[in-house]
Amino acid sequence: MTENSRINITQPHTARIWNYWLGGKDNYEVDRVAGDRIRELHPGIGEYARADRLFLGRAVEHLVTEAGIRQFLDIGTGLPTADNTHEVAQRLAPEARVVYVDNDPLVLAHARALLTSTPEGRTDYLDEDLRNTDAILRHAEKTLDFDEPVALVLLGVVIFIGDDEDPYGLVRGLVDRLPPGSHLVLSHTITSPAMPDVDEAVAFWNEHGTPKLTQRTPGSVARFFDGLELLEPGVVSCSRWRPSPEETGEGEPAEVAMFGGVARKR
């Protein structure tokens, strides 16, 4: 089966809608219609898409400049946009190496945009499902040195792992295979009584789109970091994880329904 034959343009898809909200062009009419409907139900959805992307940039910058990380395993990559993981990392450390993993055929079709690299560094792409951890790690070790610290990046991807699939065990299984000094960067859509419109938007998505989402409370998201050294300010709205001075110019950024955190493996 070719990658193009795997792309279903009759049903909205989360990666393409995310791309639409971020101002990209890699989406179809069906995605834009669903994206606009979700935005009607939850007007702030575009803001938390952007907040998640900015969180990635700030987390990668911290890991490179403060933690000395030079290797990244980014699972659930999504469609290429501005400031992808390797672009942020290699801008600061040209020798940084990044392996991207996603099982979306549209992402695969655009993977060449993720495979640019500085001469000193390296990037690679794997078409694989998060659940297939052994296959991911076997492929990643061709590019990454698992004797040295690695940053495992799981942004907005564990939401696709249902509670019946042991999501915590899945993440723990990946972290356990990484050496001390490695870090976990994770973000997740939340459910909260303070944001009832998010639940309504997710319900609409799960009825009409693919793949289905599982929301979790902030406390449940924090469980993914159990046993790790959680960096300040902990698991918070992505907009509030170490925001830049530009983002705090008018006070603390508004809270969004995407929470994230960064933690170190001792």
Image: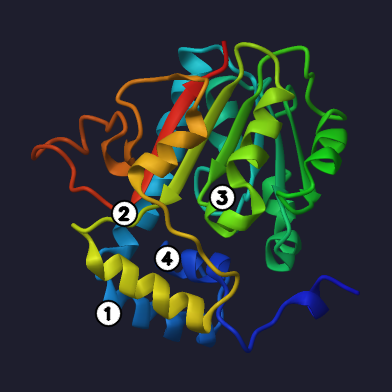
Q: Secondary structure at mark 1?
A: helix
* Mark sitting earlier along the chain (3/2): 3
Question: In screen coordinates, is 236 left or right of 162?
Answer: left
Amino acid at pointer 3: Val
The spot of residue 186 in percent (x, y) is 50, 38
Question: In screen coordinates, is 38 left or right of 70?
Answer: left
Residue at 27 percent across and 79 percent down: it is: 40
Residue at 88 percent across and 73 percent down: it is: 2
According to the image, label 1 marks what residue? 40
**Residues tagged 2 and 1 counted as in contact (Cβ below 8 A):** no
Q: Which quadrant of the view contains residue 123?
A: top right
Q: CA distance from mark 4 to mark 3?
A: 24 Å
According to the image, label 4 marks what residue? 23
Q: Which quadrant of the view contains residue 120?
A: top right
According to the image, label 3 marks what residue? 158
* Mark sitting earlier along the chain (4/1): 4
Amino acid at pointer 1: Glu
* Mark sitting earlier along the chain (2/1): 1
* Mark sitting earlier along the chain (4/3): 4
Residue at 72 percent across and 25 percent down: it is: 121
> Of discs 2 and 1, which sits in the foreground?
2
Indicate which disc residue 257 carries.
2
The spot of residue 202 in percent (x, y) is 40, 70
* Mark sitting earlier along the chain (1/3): 1
For the residue pair 82 and 212, the one nearer the viewer reads as 212
Q: CA distance from mark 4 to mark 1?
A: 17 Å
Q: CA distance from mark 1 to mark 3?
A: 25 Å
Q: Secondary structure at mark 4?
A: loop
Amino acid at pointer 2: Ala
Can residue 193 be seen at all in this image of the molecule? yes
**Residues tagged 4 and 2 counted as in contact (Cβ below 8 A):** no
